[in-house]
Image: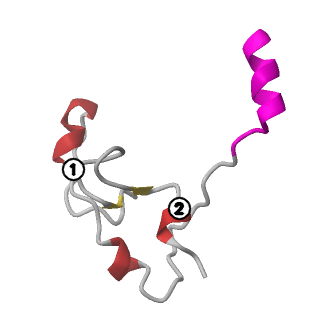
Amino acid sequence: MKHCADCRHFRKAPYQAKHEGCYHPDNMVGKQKDDYLDEQQLPGDHERINARGDCAQFEPLASQPSLLRRIFSLGA
């Protein structure tokens, strides 16, 4: 089962976005063309879209590199 919190398009309020929901372009209620109007975008209802756990636009979050790899990348 796919969970919305594990998807790349899911943003959670209040830190990542003004409204919590799915920010995939096909699922958004209102989207803005320009980046400076990002706060006016309205996400899709993630609970309705993924009600059965089979969202077609699901993309897993990118995995974070290991701590050792991150430490060595700072020195490069």
Any magenta on residue 53? no
Q: In this figure, which residue is indicated by the disc labeled 2? A: 7
Residue 49, position as x, y percentages in the image: 38, 78
Q: Earlier in the sequence, mark 2 or mark 1?
A: 2
The tag on residue 41 is 1
Q: Residue at x 21, y 50 (%)?
A: 41
Residue 10, relative to residue 16: is it above or below?
below
**For discs 2 and 1, the disc positioned in front in the rendered view:** 2
Q: Is residue 38 left or right of residue 61?
A: left
For the N terminus, the quadrant is: bottom right
Q: Is residue 44 left or right of residue 71?
A: left
Find the magenta span and give its range: 64-76
**Which quadrant of the view contains residue 61?**
bottom right
Which residue sits furthest bottom?
A: 52
Any magenta on residue 72? yes
**Which one is in front, 54 or 63?**
63
* Type of the residue with mark 1: Gln
Q: Residue at x 82, y 29 (%)?
A: 69
Element at label 2 = loop
